[in-house]
Image (spheres, coloured by chain):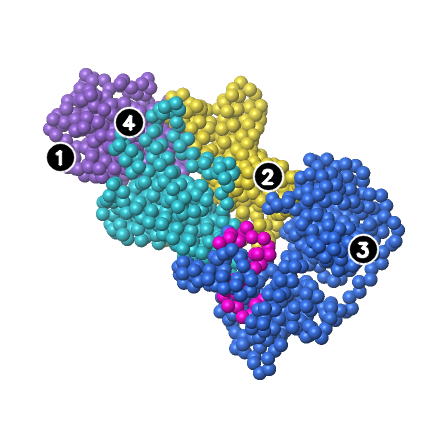
Chain colours: A yellow, B cyan, C blue, D purple
Amino acid sequence: MIARLGRGVPEPAAVGLAALVAMAVCAAAIGENPLGLLRALVLGALGDTEGLAFTLYYATDFIFAGLAVAVAYRAGLFNIGVEGQSLVAGVGLALAALASGGAPSWLAILVASLAAMVFGAAWALVPGWLLARRGGHVVITTIMFNFIASALLSWLLVDPMRAQGSMQPETRPFPPGASLLRLDDALVVLGLSPTGSPLNASLALALAAMVAAHVFLFRSRLGFETRVFGASPTAAHYAGVASTRVILIAMGLSGALASGVAINELLGAQNRLILDFSGGAGFVGIAVALLAGNRPLAIAPAALLFGFLYQGGAALGLDYPRVSPQIVTAAQGVMVLLIGGLLGRRR
Amino acid sequence: MAMENILSFLGAALRLSTPLIYACLAGLWSERAGVIDVGLEGKMLAGAFAGAAVAALTGDVGIGLAAAVAASMTLAAAQGFVEVERGGDQIVCGMAVNMIGAGVTAFVGAALFAEGGRTPALPREARVLPFVWGQDALTLGAFGVAAITAFILYRTRFGLRLRAAGENPRALDAAGGSVRATRHAAVAVCGLLCGLSGADLSLAQAAGFLPAMTAGKGFIALAALVFAKWRPGAALATCLLFGGLDAAAIRMEGAPLPFLGVIPTQAFQALPYLMTVVLLAGFVGGARPPAAAGQPYRRE
Amino acid sequence: MPALGAPPALRVFGVTKRFGAVVANKDISLDVARGEIHAIVGENGAGKSTLMSILMGMVTPDAGEIFVDGVRARIRSPRDAAALGLGMVHQHFMLVDTLDVLDNVMLGAEGGALLAAGRKRARARLADLSRAHGLSVDPDAIVGDLPVGLRQRVEILKALARDARIIILDEPTAALTPDEANDLGLLMRWLAADGASILFITHKLNEALAVADRISVLRAGAVVATHAAAATDARELARAMVGRDVDNALSRGDGPPGRTLLEARDLTARGADGRARLSGVSLSLRAGEIVGVAGVAGHGQSELIEVLAAMRRMESGALALDGEPVDAAVYDPARARALGVAHVPEDRSRHGIVGEFPAAGNAILGRHRDRALGRRLLDPGAIRARCADLMERWDVRPRAPDTPVGRFSGGNQQKLVFAREIEAGPAILLVGQPTRGVDIGAIEAIHRRLLALRDAGKAILLVSVELDEIFALSDRILVMHEGRIVGERATASTDRREIGLLMAGVVERAA
Amino acid sequence: EIKPAIVYDLGGKFDKSFNEGAFRGGERFTAETGVALRDFEIQNDAQREQALRRFARDGASPVIAVGFSHAAALDKVARDFPQTPFAIVDMVVDRPNVKSIVFREHEGSYLVGLLAAMASKSGKIGFVGGMDIPLIRKFACGYRQGARRANPGVEIFENMTGVTGAAWADPVKGGELARAQIDRGADVIYQAAGGTGIGVLRAAADAGKLGVGTDANQNGLFPGHVLTSMLKRVDNAVIRAFSTARAGTWTSGVESLGLREEGVGWALDDNNRGLVTPAMKDAADRAVDAIVSGDIVVHDYMADSRCPP
Ligand SMILES: Nc1ncnc2c1ncn2[C@@H]1O[C@H](COP(=O)(O)OP(=O)(O)OP(=O)(O)O)[C@@H](O)[C@H]1O
Ligand SMILES: Nc1ncnc2c1ncn2[C@@H]1O[C@H](COP(=O)(O)OP(=O)(O)OP(=O)(O)O)[C@@H](O)[C@H]1O
Ligand SMILES: [Mg+2]
Ligand SMILES: [Mg+2]
């Protein structure tokens, strides 16, 4: 796996190390013991089952988001709108889940997940369509669509979808059937002690999506056409690849993959629709995809690295109240800048 | 609307436009030179934080402003190094700058002031105060900067080279101009203006720094830039329009409009983004970015 | 002619430049006297452009020295070059399309921090130059709106406006009509008479012989000969270029052509810029013949081949393949392939290959729908095997299916494209500029294969700007001018002069 | 010895609002008793449960969750740790081991409304809320009732900053809303908007008008320009919770804190003494007595989602 990441792409380990060094320097700058801080970070993320489970829970989001970015990137489309796509996917998921009362659990989950994918894909298809038909630059339109999605979600939760009498802009809880199997529930049934994390079956879904994305890109004819189009739209035209079709399929798939974030967060953890539930996973996905060189199978380790940083950073807060968990965001920024600088432009 | 209401609305529109104008012109400098910048937000945050933090520590608004500009330009220099020297992907670098800006300001702020990343509220002498029609020097300065930008862009040697660097850097290189120097200078000016934009938020408008206080203004500025088709005069006008929308939203919140009823605030918030998408999709006449924007330049 | 005693205007001494393993310039030494036109000829990749880039400070040589007017010059950037009086007209124009002519001329030599004064001076200078050399261009026109010929004029004006005394022109005639090329030759003479020194790169030996005082031949990075133009001829130059006598003798079968495989009626189409490029083109193509399409670049040949290959939509007209009418609405490149039309595109790197893909991926480009490559999913093994087989049959080197095709030489890339298109067994082959950017060995191989295909009963349409190639391969020649077919001749009953006149739009005089 | 812990809401412990109140209370408790306190600022919704569970498992006791948003998470964790005493501020969670601490903010708001209307020269006063939620409407409703009592003809402008969590941290918008109200004639403006409120108070001060602070005593932020502050003594509630736990007298169930319990009130100190006339102070004191004695019942918006005009 590591070997496949080669070709000038820095390995997650190396970049992760750079991020840790950056954090240690920051910590030292404010007079904290950098080694102690790193220790707390590592132990917090990997030291016990709870930390590990949270790391995997965050990584689940990042796998989905990373795949969403990577699939679009392979078609030459820089989809910065994964965040917005996952938010809108959440709306679809919530509508279906809330309506699923009385349905058997498997059906509720299936319908809610499909609704999420359809909504996520649809939200991604609009910029795709604007590009294919009207030449609207996809980077800018997807950025704009993030904000529009966020405003839309906020309006929905403040007004039509808000739970009666709730203080919060959120829907009422989903019916009990509309929730994914949690690791903790399984552990309890087995008589083991729970981890206290919302880690759930979406991780398996994420890994399956990863393999599916790999097969799609590297084994299917459509995936071949997608990659040809991404590498050279002119050659794709020559090869009889219909650009509109490829753009729409790639953006649709990207949006559908983005909906995985909604599935993990809403069906797996929150069991209701809340504001900004994706918590920036869509943006982390860009870094994950880049770090993985847009190779689907390399996305899991990259996502794991970011999950580790997230959970470790959160755990820091317990032992180092002076150290803002935002230090992790800063370290990620340094990492991404390094990746950007080392990678150069690939197209 | 009564006369004083109109004046007060215009005053609010001017104030709310100011950070957008600086940020939008910052993006204009960078992108006209061929360097796409989605990292305006991060540099604004850096400027806002450094300005407020230093003003709080020294009690001097002048030093605060200088610090805002210095912090933002430092970030811009790092970004410029990766983008211009290493040929790094400009969109990736911009995203990275946003992360660094958001993370470092919150982190350093928390460590310095132990107020969860906020700076203490600034006393009057550490703030940029209004002095005429409820407006302050930064707001007036924004108009000056727009004029200067237009002048430099269209009337000076540097401006000509900057436009060439954004349209066809090879031509500039072959003609004996330095693409590197031009782009570095443009990115530096971009940093300077982002610093002023951030300073306006924390020193003039809010009297202190709050984590993530830019709240997407860097991206609104980007939207305005597209809307203005990368021209300084139009950028000024678009930012005033967006600021006016914001002021209108504040004033109309919850108040029913004739025929339309109560418009959700979110609709106002989304409007600039929607307008940009519509424009970009060529429904209102296309917006063509500088031809070489986004492309690192390397000599063959 | 070099004046005795005076140092040459430009002296290149011992210049060497390597790109990795490639020695692009090998110990090159060369003089250009004041007032001399010095042509440089050589095969693709011989190192001509590299030498010019070194002179202009765009490329740093590994070794060697350059003297201007006898003084050693250090040229580290185009700015240094301009200061020494060197100016270059680049083959791919170095113009900013969105700026007006004046700004383009001024760029890099603005004459002060503010533009106003410089613009005034530049305007006056352009007026002078226009009067002196008849080089008139509207100084306020936006360069992107100008036709190719005028753009090149702007490039020349750029050099002249900054008083270049040594002017380098890299393949300036490639995009020009013969008339325009003629005018350019006159201008060069004018400038030389005025005391300028001119370095002139061309692939057209006759042009070099007509315009230059002396001609240097580059081969594999080294200067292999320098002749006075008056004392040499095309044959000698060609031999120097290639290193042996060029043998154009190709054998072809003499069976009569078979049935009509492709029939086009009244095709019209527009270019990417929206201008009409094909106006009422009709032609037919029969089994067992090669039809050559001659014409000055930009007169619709590219659009013709693209329309036939379904890469460009026809606006009106009718097309029939093997007697069956084709529905224009659903005719796309994939369908064309399915109907037995193969296409070797003229712009290989843009259309024919994906440089960053491995050779194996390129070997199935456009042929990836073939079920033999895997029923539901593509089988990587089958793809590599297909590629290896093509490489074997067409002697593509290296035999490395996993190597990104961008690392192959142009000739080998082209062979891979030919292999892919021909081994798919099409009835009709559309070929654009088959030997552009291809070395002499590959050219011979490709020519032989094309003739063999013809003999095997395929119908081949050959578009080339190289008249030699057209004459060597075609059974019939169509000549295009301004989007129309202005003449059709059997190769045996015409000559280059007649075709050249047709190409220039002189229609009936030749008839 | 007890091992107290606090989990703050997303605003963080320096939100100039109820989180900060809880933090200050904890600080004082530690200073007075020497008992170490652990606390945690969550960064996202997933961490609510994580933090509560983590503290409970580490044996912390009692664990206070600050903010109504913790309700769902606390409900689960309290079920899983039935032996651990929990408390939640601003919300009722019905579990045997949970103490629900709610405040009768409408009573305190009534007092500052009364004072605002008396201090106003123009007969126009304003209210700027943070996020538009029932809790903040409760503030506005109490304010309105107090103001009407002092001056039935008073004109009241009400604005909410927004509808999402961002509305708590947008001082620029808060300032603009205040300015707009001032332009319409308001000369006293009450803020219940967390960090946004600082912008409200500053705009009022800059315009030479009066602001009214919330939660903590904000009179000193712009001395001479803050009429008073509606005190919401989360700090006292936290100290009391910890102290009862320490003394072994901890009780679960709903604890409603109003004027009578000194859970809410109004601030009078050196910073605003010059602004509050004896008549105003007198009126406020009488209103306190009347509310405590039950002679005045301030309507609670959250009781029926309605506010008397
Ligand atoms: N970076 C490179 N690496 C490898 N080969 C290169 C590189 N750049 C150019 N070449 C090869 O060098 C040859 C000449 O390239 P060059 O760019 O000089 O062409 P040109 O003179 O500009 O255009 P034309 O080929 O149309 O005459 C081509 O065969 C090209 O493929
Ligand atoms: N930037 C580069 N990097 C690597 N190799 C290069 C580069 N530029 C040129 N070359 C190589 O140097 C050799 C000389 O190229 P050059 O462009 O000088 O040829 P040329 O004589 O101009 O050819 P043409 O007739 O196609 O214009 C070629 O083999 C080419 O592949
Ligand atoms: Mg060349
Ligand atoms: Mg060439």
- Residue sitting at x 35%, y 36%: B244
Name which quarter of the figure residue B254 lies in.
top left
User: In the image, which disc is placed on residue D274?
Assistant: 1
Above or below residue B1? Residue B215 is below
* Residue picked out by circle 3: C491
Above or below residue C504? Residue A152 is above
* Residue picked out by circle 4: D158
Between the C-alphas of marks 2 and 4, the distance is: 49 Å
Residue A60: give x, y in percent of width and height: 53, 38
Tag 3 and tag 4, C-beta contact below 8 Å: no
Letter of the chain that mark 2 sits on in the rendering? A
Question: Do discs 2 and 4 belong to a common subunit?
Answer: no
Letter of the chain that mark 1 sits on in the rendering? D
Between the C-alphas of marks 1 and 4, the distance is: 27 Å
* Residue picked out by circle 2: A247
Query: CB at mark 3 closer than 8 A to ligand 1?
Result: no
**Residue C152 within the segment the image draws in magenta:** yes
Question: Do discs 3 and 4 belong to a common subunit?
Answer: no
Side (left or right) of B89 relative to C18? left
Tag 3 and tag 1, C-beta contact below 8 Å: no
Question: Do discs 1 and 4 belong to a common subunit?
Answer: yes
- Residue sitting at x 71%, y 68%: C241
The boundaries of the magenta stretch are C140-168
* Farthest-out residue, bottom: C5
Q: Residues within 10 Å of mark 3 (few under 14, many from 20)?
A: many
Kind of residue sitting beneath label 3 = Thr
Nearer the camera: disc 3 or disc 1: 3
Letter of the chain that mark 4 sits on in the rendering? D
Q: Residues within 10 Å of mark 2 (few under 14, many from 20)?
A: many
